[in-house]
Image: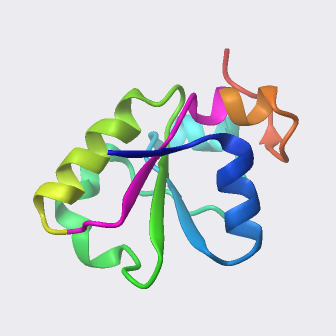
Amino acid sequence: MKEMTPQQAFDAWKAGDVSIVDVREQDEYDAAHVDGMPLVPLSEIGDRIGDFPTDKTLVLMCRSGKRSAKAAEILTGEGVTDVANLVGGIMAWAEDGLPIVGDPPK
């Protein structure tokens, strides 16, 4: 599975080269998220395969990187091949000083 650091993902996202999707649950997203980044909870991934863009690399983000890795496995199993996991999740994103709305999870 491909992996991206928060800075790599942020730079590629700003350049329009990747789509980043948050796979945490709604309450986690409400507490802290990246503005403009859509939410598709891990619990809904299997039912929403068609909601993911296929024209660029799909980067998945969760709290620490574990659920997003699971989401990447599910999507890859469903034939979505250009998927990457965000190493360290939103915690690492916030630690790197990248923009976030709300209080980063601990």
Q: Position of residue 36 (x, y in %)?
A: 70, 66
The reply to whether the magenta stretch includes residue 86 is: yes
Q: Position of residue 6 (x, y in %)?
A: 68, 42
Is residue 35 visible in this depiction of the protein? no
Residue 77 versus residue 30 in the image, above or below: below
Q: Residue at x 74, y 28 (%)?
A: 104
Horizontal arrangement in the rendering, residue 7 relative to residue 28 (left or right): right
The reply to whether the magenta stretch includes residue 42 is: no
Give the quarter of the figure containing the N terminus: top left
| Quarter-of-image position of residue 48 | bottom left
Residue 73 versus residue 65 in the image, above or below: below
Q: Position of residue 43 (x, y in %)?
A: 26, 45
Residue that lies at the very extreme toward the bottom in this rendered image: 55
Q: Residue at x 49, y 56 (%)?
A: 59
Horizontal arrangement in the rendering, residue 56 relative to residue 30 (left or right): left
Which sits in the foreground, 55 or 53?
A: 55
Part of the protein shown in magenta: 80-91
Q: Residue at x 46, y 40 (%)?
A: 24
Give the quarter of the figure containing the C terminus: top right
| Quarter-of-image position of residue 50 | bottom left
Q: Position of residue 21 (x, y in %)?
A: 50, 58
Q: How is the image coloured?
A: rainbow
Q: Please state the total of marks drawn on the protein image.
A: 0
Residue 65 versus residue 106 in the image, above or below: below
Is residue 79 visible in this depiction of the protein? yes
Residue that lies at the very extreme toward the top in this rendered image: 106
Horizontal arrangement in the rendering, residue 46 relative to residue 93 (left or right): left
Which sits in the foreground, 16 or 102?
A: 16
